[in-house]
Image (cartoon, helix red, strand yellow):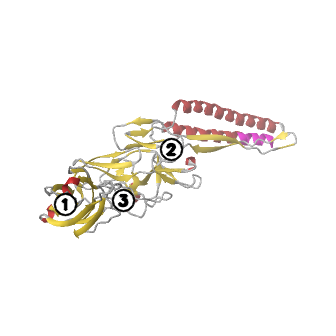
Amino acid sequence: MTISSSLNAGVAGLSANATRLASISDNIANSSTFGYKRVETDFHSLVLGSSGRSYTAGGVRTINQRLIDQGGSLVTTSNPTDLAVRGRGMFPVASAAEVLGGTGDPELLLTTTGSFRIDEDGYLATNSGLILMGWPAALDGSIPPFSRDTSDGLEPVQFALNLIGDPTTAIDMSLNVPATGTAAGSSGDPYSLSVEYFDNLGTSQNISMTFTPTVPATGASNEWTIVMTDSAQDDAVVGEYVVTFDDSRTAGGTIASVTTVSGGAYDPVSGEIDLTVAGGPITLDIGAVGDNQGMSQLSDSFAPISITKDGSPVGNMTSVEVDENGNVFALFDSGVTKRIYQIPLVDMPNPNGLQALDQQTYRPSTESGAFFLWDAGDGPTGDIKSYAREESTTDVATELTSMIQTQRAYSSNAKVIQTVDEMLQETTNIKR
């Protein structure tokens, strides 16, 4: 029994070292593979126990583990959409075959690096067939709230490959009208201002505004009449409003009230007016009642301070950039930069429990724990580096050293089997 157990232990040793050699071979073969995570083979003794003074050899067994939580060095590239995670977290990707096949929601896969480029369908994909996933931005560039414990909100990152236009839907205006303009004896001359907007076809249009003071016989009225016309409608009036300003000590210069003569109603809480131009509604923010933002009546000068708006003219997309927080921007030859997606980083309690697949991708499993989608740089996750790839975590020198040790251990186990064979031969020779 003891001799037989020695033979079994030797065979187990040969199998264990062969397994270790296989993992070493895989690591060395992928020493130049971007994003590769090395496999480590651990040996564990198997104890069968003993009876009396005899000992029964149990042998050895192996456990293979891919060290996914180990990060490789980052190397610089010349492609702005070569991406790598600096720190904890993984990119969500999907198989191009599932995305293009249209068979439903693609399966969520994870990777730590990739050389993504825009393919013929506008998808940001690798040449091995992985498409980057992200949250789509709203028309104004903001990212709507999405569930963080599911992949339901993720979509394949895709760009329009033709000319696009982005109509204006909101304008924020901050300007000052002179407090002396509504005083008795003033000239009463109106002030003019033109605000550009982009229609549904990307054409530049203008909303022209005239600010006319109400001049009383005595004192000051603090009242202005604003008339707005649309160039796309042959300068037809789209709104007329009477704005009265406060002249008290605590709120002097702020809007006291707005009376609508024609056009969309004024909201005193938000400070917004809904103007209907040729291409549709535009929200004009002139400031809320009592707010020191927006329109004001101070001093003796007419001063447009700030006018901001969304929308853009028609343009060709020239390049794509990804910042450290995962925001994906499209750059156009019209000079416009627009955020269209945000790439989250996926994290889970035990990254080493992920199921390894081809192309340096991984699938969540029960051993990895439930995943959560973080904004890059928030929580436990690192940030995203563009113009970068993650190198393999294989250290060739270490693997070659382990190979020498494995070879010696394999030879030693083979010697054990040879010795047991000779002892069994001697046992059979007793009969002679």
Q: CA distance from mark 1 to mark 2?
A: 71 Å
Residue 84: percent from left, percent from top: 43, 42
| Vertical comparison of 77 with 101: above or below | above
* The stretch drawn in magenta includes residue 284: no
The disc at residue 28 is none
Q: Nearer the viewer, residue 65 or 370?
A: 370
**Left or right side of 5 for 123:** left
Q: Which one is closest to the eye, mark 2 or mark 3?
A: 2
The earlier-in-sequence mark between 3 and 1 is 3
The residue lying at 47 percent from left, 35 percent from top is 73
Number of disc labels: 3
Three-letter residue code for mark 1: Thr
Is 8 one of the magenta-colored residues? Answer: yes
Are the residues tagged 2 and 3 within 8 Å (C-beta)? no
- Contact, CB < 8 Å: mark 1 with mark 2? no
Residue marked by disc 1 = 218
Q: Is the C terminus in the top left, top right, bottom left or bottom right quadrant?
A: top right
Secondary-structure class at tag 3: helix
Closer to the camera in the image, 243 or 198: 243
**Residue 205 image offset from top left, x and y in percent:** 17, 58
Residue 425 position within the rendered picture, expressed as x and y whole percent measured from the top left: 77, 37
Magenta region? 1-9
As rendered, which of 200 and 276 lies closer to the eye?
276
